[in-house]
Image (cartoon, rainbow, N blue to C red):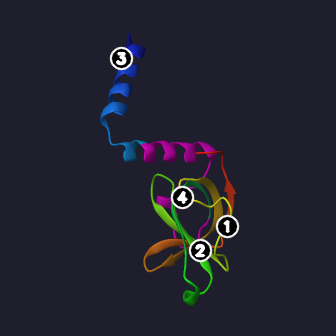
Amino acid sequence: MAPAAGYFRRLTRRLTEDLDQLDAEEMAETADASGACRASECSRGDEVTMLGRLRSVEACPKAAGASMEAEFFDGTDAVTLVWIGRRRIPGIEPGKTVKIRGRVGDRGGEKVIYNPYYELQGTT
């Protein structure tokens, strides 16, 4: 009976908890299983590999110089990704799951990675 009780407990939790919270927990578990660093545990100067999802992507206007920014979220914290000299990168779109690698910096108190290496992961 214990396995059935555990199943119903998990099912009840999935049906009653906030979807964003469940999605964040699932992303964090997937990142941990892949051996990636958690965004919440990295700090300025760290060379990291992280797995997560792009929440938003935007091209900066011409006046500001060519660059593209994306908000990356791994279930624990957000990191801003900045590609300098790019206005568009095929495949880099909101909702896509990516594995990124780069050095964490700081911009106005927020974590940022400039020109990260990236790998698009399966479809989402």
Tag 4 near tag 2, CB within 8 Å: no
Q: Where is residue 113, by image quadrant?
A: bottom right
Q: Pick out the residue farthest to the bottom.
A: 63
In the figure, 13 relative to 123: above or below?
Answer: above
**Label 3 CA crowd tier, 10 Å (few <14, some 14–19, many 20+):** few
31 is within the stretch colored magenta: yes
User: Disc 3 to disc 2, how far (Cα)?
Assistant: 49 Å
- In the depicted view, which residue is nearer to us: 35 or 28? 28
**Residue 9 drawn at (x, y percent):** 34, 24
In the figure, 1 relative to 102: above or below?
Answer: above
Foreground label between 3 and 1: 1
Write down the residue under mark 1: 89
Residue at 51% from the left image edge and 46% from the top image edge = 27
Write down the residue under mark 2: 68
Q: Amino acid at mark 2?
A: Met
The label number, if any, that marks residue 5 in the structure image: 3
User: Disc 2 to disc 1, how far (Cα)?
Assistant: 8 Å
Give the mark nearest the N terminus, 3 or 1.
Answer: 3
User: Disc 3 to disc 1, how far (Cα)?
Assistant: 47 Å
Q: Secondary structure at mark 2?
A: strand
**Label 4 CA crowd tier, 10 Å (few <14, some 14–19, many 20+):** some
**Residue 22 drawn at (x, y percent):** 40, 42
Q: Pick out the residue farthest to the front.
A: 62
Give the mark nearest the N terminus, 4 or 2.
Answer: 2
Q: Secondary structure at mark 4?
A: loop
Tell me the magenta residue range.
Answer: 23-47
Image quadrant occupied by the N terminus: top left
Q: Secondary structure at mark 3?
A: helix
